[in-house]
Amino acid sequence: MSSATATAPAVNAAATTRPRESRAALYASLGLLALLLVAWQILPTALAVPKYIIPTLSDCLVEFGRMWTSESLLANTASTALYTILGFAIGSALGAALGYLLGMSEFWEKVLSPYILALQIAPKVAFAPLFIMWFGYNAMPKLLVTVLIVFFPVLVNVLQAMRTVDRDLVNLARAYNLSRFQIFLKVEMPSTLPNLMAGLRIASTLAVIGVTVGELVGGNTGLGFLISYGGGQANAAMVFNAIILLTVIGFLLYSALVRAETRLLHYLPKAQF
């Protein structure tokens, strides 16, 4: 019996086991969620925790209905989602573009690196009041804070990937008289895609933070504004609902990137356990 024939049953068994494990993990995750929801509903009342500190699940659902009819919840959620996606797209594009440009020029990387590092170290939240003074109480400050927060993870990941591109492949491409752009398109860009997608996934979670900070500091729309307003009214249920919706927006954006990464990087081998 050949080795290929001997390993075939093991491969088939592994292929059958993985879907079962995925379903088991899904059921376990849903079961844990159900337990958490039950505990959320029961424990605050059982422990006599006031509603303005930790509301129950039913309190949040009732407040959700009130927010839908009285607080323009759909419009505020749409505003936050829109600027999350817009800020993520602009910040990611700028970070990736600058990362690739600096990766192709060692001279300009050395020139600009101290300034990029200084801007990266500076707390991004501190820029929000400055943007408000410059642009007023509108959507621009939260968009700029989001772009600034998203920019650096993408830039750093892309730049690091450009530094580690296989030089032998680059030299081989030069031996075939490929132009600089062709080398980037055929060698450097494919090599850096995994790092780029990792940076985008990190940035997707930070984009929600950027928008929320802008809305908390000086916004008059969005879920961050509802958090600020609900906190001022000691309405914890409103704050909980807004936080949950922010989490959903971030989760959906992250999930979309994971699906895109799976399609783009389908050729990469997956680790087998």
Image (spheres, helix red, strand yellow):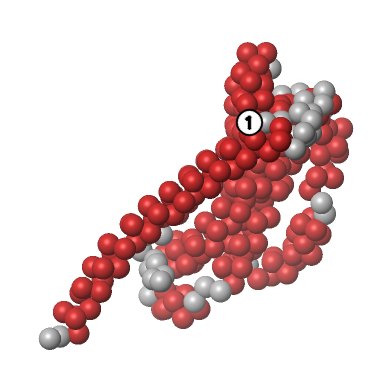
Q: Residues within 10 Å of mark 1 (few under 14, many from 20)?
A: some
Depth check: 221 or 72 in front? 72
Residue 227 seen anywhere in this rendered image of the structure: no
Q: Secondary structure at mark 1?
A: helix
Q: Residue at x 67, y 21 (%)?
A: 63
- How many numbered markers are drawn? 1
Residue 165 seen anywhere in this rendered image of the structure: yes
**Residue 62 image offset from top left, x and y in percent:** 63, 20
> Of the residues shown, which amino acid type is indicated by label 1?
Leu
Q: Residue at x 82, y 54 (%)?
A: 122
Depth check: 11 or 94 in front? 11
Left or right of residue 55: residue 182: left
Q: Quadrant of residue 104?
A: bottom right
Depth check: 145 or 23 in front? 23
> Residue at label 1?
57
**Residue 36 image offset from top left, x and y in percent:** 59, 43
Identity of the residue furthest to the top in this view = 70
